[in-house]
Image: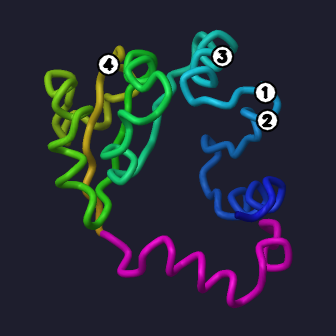
Amino acid sequence: MAPLQDRLRYARSLVRHPRIHVSDIEQRLGTTYTANTLERLKSLLPHSRLIWLMGADNLQQFPNWKRWTDIVATVPLAVFDRNHYSLRGLTGKMATRFRHSRLSVQAAKALATKTAPAWVFISLRRHPASATEIREAQTAISPFSVAVKPKE
């Protein structure tokens, strides 16, 4: 994995919306686990509407995360379709336990207004390449520290 500063620079170069902010907040807060980070963010930003975004690959193994039920109880989740993972994720422990908290796709726009636990599964047009293939292609061009150029 590339150093944090390189990953942050790369992520910032991709942002195209003024309401999306790339942050090193976990490093600054000194938190290691998502549940702790989200609790701190909720206390620091009491009037913000936070949503946890994750791919279906994480949904499948989410119950292995430290305090995963606390995460679900803290913020709404948007889970994005991922090839080969969605079916297992949608029939797994998290989806089963919180099946009554799942919103329809039509209600996805209102997710930020919902009280946790609330989650939605979103299917989008998939990019034909896997994340691994994209990372390998990027690395083949040049490492993050060289390839990343700030937005103009």
Distance Cα–Cα, label 1 vs label 2? 5 Å
**Residue 43 found in image quarter:** top right
How many numbered discs?
4
Where residue 117 sits: x, y (%)?
32, 18
Reading the image, the residue beneath label 2 is 27
Marking on residue 40: 3
Q: Quadrant of the C terminus?
A: bottom right
Where residue 102 sits: x, y (%)?
20, 30
Reading the image, the residue beneath label 1 is 30
Q: Earlier in the sequence, mark 2 or mark 3?
A: 2
Left or right of 31 on screen, residue 117: left
Three-letter amino acid code at the position of disc 3: Arg
The residue positioned 20% from the left and 31% from the top of the image is: 103
Question: Is disc 2 placed on a helix, strand or loop?
Answer: helix
Three-letter amino acid code at the position of disc 2: Gln
Tell us which disc is closer to us: 4 or 2: 2
The residue positioned 27% from the left and 58% from the top of the image is: 85
Question: Is disc 3 placed on a helix, strand or loop?
Answer: helix
The front one of 2 and 146 is: 2
Given contact means CB atoms under 8 Å apart, are the residues at marks 1 and 2 in contact? yes
**Residue 127 found in image quarter:** bottom left
Label 3 environment density (alpha carbons within 10 Å; few <14, some 14–19, many ≥20):
some
Magenta-tinted stretch: 126-152
The residue positioned 78% from the left and 66% from the top of the image is: 151
